[in-house]
Amino acid sequence: MVEPLRQGTSVLRARGLSRHFGGLAAVNDVSLECCMGEVHAVIGPNGAGKTTLINVLSGDLPPSSGRIELHGRDVTGLASHQISRLGVGRSYQKSNVFLPFTAFENCRLAAQSRLVSSMRFFRAAARYRAVNEAAERALVEVGLETRADVALASLSHGERRQIEIAMTLATRPQVLLLDEPLAGMGAEESARIVELLRKLVSDHAILLVEHDMDAVFAVADVLTVMVNGNVLESGAPEQIRSSKAVQEAYLGTDDSNTTD
Amino acid sequence: MDRRKTAIVALVLCLAALAVLPFVSEKFYVQLFTKILIMGIFAMSLDLLIGYSGLVSFGHAAYFGGAGYVLVLVSPQYAAASLWTSLPIAVAAAALLALGIGMLVLRTSGIYFIMVTLAFSQMLFFLFHDTKIAGGADGIYIYVRPVADILGWKPFDLENVVHLYFVVLAVFIAVFVLLRVVLASLFGRVIEGIRINESRMRSLGYATFRYKLACFVIAGALAGLAGYLSAIQFGVVNPDMLAWHLSGSVMMMVILGGMGTLVGPALGAMVMMLLELGLQSLPEVGGLDIGRHWQLLMGSFIVLVALLLPQGLIGLLTKRGAKKAHG
């Protein structure tokens, strides 16, 4: 759909992004960059503004101020469906799926969104083969192809989390905004998703919000630490690991996570 | 697969029964079932909004009555209009009305959506009720029903009760098939997705507003088709066709029969209208005229169904609801 980009090309860029809720600055003057072939992890304690940051980048929430650029183009203030169509896919922290639909139908609906228009009234949806295949591929990627015909309401919590990611992938985004993809997954499922992220990163720009520090340090190329809506520090994993400020504010509170 | 076969057999039997009805029953029942089929079309069109897209419209009579009034307005007073021109005009007018109202009401949701759809239909009601347009509060007669004339050949005569019945039956079947096809299409999948989780549909890249609007227009056009047929059947159009009572009873038919199915609303229309007739004809018992207070019994019946059959009457036919079998 969009031409492949060289690794390291900056795809998504936030400049001085803020989002206020009344007097609370949930996100305050945040600038960051997502590049092709990189996992940019955003970490920070609960309430640091990580989810709000994703909501602003995905267009779910308009920013109070600042600017968002996609491929150098200003996309600030675009609605979430427009951002999605420009190749930015997001997953939600709490599974945001279609519970009465089967796993396959959830992914099929996600894949269908890439057609130019769904204002087609007569031909049966099941007969769009490319859409079906894209949905099947997404299920295979998260390892749930055997559960294709099970309604989401009957899947386990961890499996729903995997479908959440499969749906995002089925929209074939270039930029992935993943909000705690591993939350609520078992060890085996987590390992599978981490493996998937490693594979995806070659042709995606990934922004990852995650609490599992082992996973974060296993995949992240760049780390940004947020505290109270502000960026505390941003840089390579080693730099973050050795930063005094970060240790005090965040990592230091849970030593077991930082030592491999 | 077994369930699917059963459903098909049941459907074919129903159609066969409807097809032989005029040959075995009195004129009265032919007229009654014409009315039931028209309300069935109306109820299916509303279910497209309530049951499939999650848009609880409480002003669906606006399109039903609106098309009826358009038929009157395009008909010459003492001569027949042409079916082939008046029908498309009436249906297009209902669609246009739904487009205009939809663009405004779809900016709201939930309880506010219910309120504004009601408000718009009541505005239309009072427009015809309080002014002299088309006979004001008394309504207006259609002295001559539209003719279906093809170069001098008349395939059927709408003045003939049996002919009208078969035309309505054919339209009913066509609408049923059309809705099934549309619901299985890409568009149909999108509107069901919107009902279940609209915000996720948006983040998947769907501009949900325009799909909801398209759905609102289709439902309005089909309601207009039903209203046009109803105006022909009764030969009269009055503000009651636009009133909230009608919006309420068609909503009741949908809920009673089973939301989110096509057979359900049609079944609901039939059961409610037959029940109304049956209850009204109940005899006087010990000085109490039960038939006159039929609405008490109807109310109890609706409460019972709501309590015992959360999926509506269709829940009686299929254990897991009709969704799987009838789509």
Image: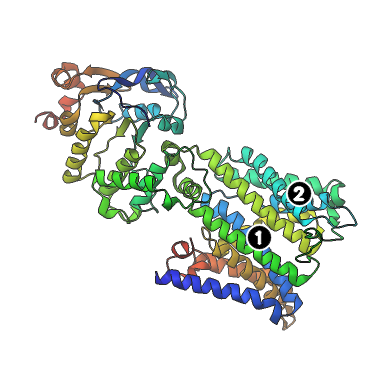
Is B228 in front, or is B240?
B228
- The relative height of residue A140 versus residue A177 in the rendered view (above or below) is below
Give the secondary structure at mark 2.
helix
Q: Residue reaching furthest right?
A: B78
* Residue nearer the viewer, B297 or A143: A143
Please say whether residue B114 is visible from this viewpoint: no
On-image quarter of the N terminus of chain A: top left
Q: Disc number at residue B249? A: 1
For disc 2, the marked residue is B125
Q: Quadrant of residue A241?
A: top left
Q: Earlier in the sequence, mark 2 or mark 1?
A: 2
Q: Dot 2 falls on which chain?
A: B
The image shows residue B30 at horizontal and vertical percentages of 72, 74
Give the image location of residue A121, x and y in percent. 53, 49
Q: Nearer the viewer, residue B56 or A189?
A: A189
Disc 1 element: helix
Instruction: Identify the amino acid type marked 2.
Output: Phe
Q: Is residue B200 left or right of residue A213?
A: right
